Amino acid sequence: MNWVITIGGIIALIVLHELGHFAVAKAVGMRVERFSLFFPPKLIGFKRGETEYMVGAIPAGGYVKITGMSPEEVEELEPEVARRAYYNQAPWKRIAVILAGPGVNLIITFVLFWVVLASGVLDGVVTMNNLDPGLNAVTSAVTVGVIEKGAPAEGVLREDDRILKVDGRPASMESVRDVIASHRCAGKPTAGCRAVTPATLLLRRGGKDVQVSVTPEYNAKAGRMLLGFIFGFSARSMTPLQAASGSLRTMWVTTEETITGLGEAITNSKRREELKSVVGITEVTEQAVAAGAGRGLVVIGFVSLILAVINLFPFLPLDGGHVLWSVAEKLRGRRISAIAMWRFSSVGIVLLLFFVVNGFSNDIHRLTG
């Protein structure tokens, strides 16, 4: 079921991206020849009016084919058709059509991030806080979170126990740490030695106060006595406006880190090993969906954001390339040849292939061990 939700979510992102292009192209009067989920060869499809709707066999995205997407194509069209061709429209119309696709993805990301922050669903908020630690969306509480296997706390403490007192002292995160650390082993502390005396904890469990005793154990790595649990977390309450601000902040920080990471991947082998193809992205998304609804929403929103960012790179055939040349034409006052556009974009195409090949290579290496 998780895989069904994951594949469905990624397909929805592709369809909505292309639907943005499609709707605005229709709205400004362009002639749309094809709306396709995935790439040819065609598996199924039908035609309604002047537009063919189809599903392709190669699951590497989708596309909307608008008549006259290159200057050379326009010259071969019938006058009535050429009137509605992409390259015969004003630059602002072309830019609006192209930006509509990434724009939809950005809106999807914003809405999903906002829903998670406004609702306070913990697994989603923690995931967003991991994306942007400066968000400060998570607060620690004096409750028991994860309990380590084989630790003194195992079998005595329970997840979500609220600690009220420790050895008679009112509990705070600092006092719990300090009091537990004050217990001593019989001799010189060594890894795994138990304290001479147990720690007494007063807990609130299921609406009742419960007193338990746990003997701390020395952890050589931490250099102090521990019970072997992590404090619990809670999501910071946010107003709708604060959630909106947090959503925008996380989008900005994540975009900066993504662009920086891609730049570093060109020269840094460790960064290259982190690249993923659509296979790896799908697998990570499925794991997030399985981990919880909130985490799944954040990861789907993250994938939507990356789809927008990558598409806005200023190289053909990406959306950013079409925007770049529409702006250049407006500034220049006349059309730019397709040869010039593709010559410039060849650098971007090589970089894109570099990222794609490395991503698939990493996924194949990981899946085959």
Image (cartoon, rainbow, N blue to C red):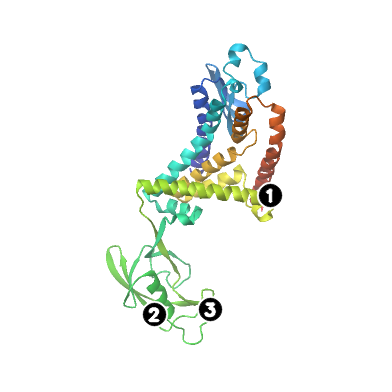
User: Label 2 sits on what residue type?
Assistant: Pro
**Total marks placed:** 3
Q: Nearer the viewer, residue 52 or 114?
A: 114
Asked if one can make out residue 289 in the rendered structure from this viewpoint, the answer is no
The reply to whether callout 2 and callout 3 are in contact (CB within 8 Å) is no
The mark nearer the N terminus, 2 or 1, is 2
The CA distance from mark 1 to mark 3 is: 44 Å
The spot of residue 29 in percent (x, y) is 52, 20
Q: Nearer the viewer, residue 206 or 23?
A: 23
- Residue denoted by label 2: 198
Residue 191 numbered tag: 3
The residue depicted at 53 percent of the width and 81 percent of the height is 190
Residue 266 numbered tag: 1
Asked if one can make out residue 310 in the rendered structure from this viewpoint, the answer is yes
Q: Nearer the viewer, mark 2 or mark 1?
A: 1
| Above or below for 198 versus 143 | below
| Above or below for 160 versus 318 | below
The CA distance from mark 2 to mark 3 is: 17 Å
The CA distance from mark 2 to mark 1 is: 55 Å
In the picture provided, is 327 more to the left or to the right than 213?
right
Q: Secondary structure at mark 2?
A: loop
User: Label 3 sits on what residue type?
Assistant: Ala
User: Label 1 sits on what residue type?
Assistant: Ile
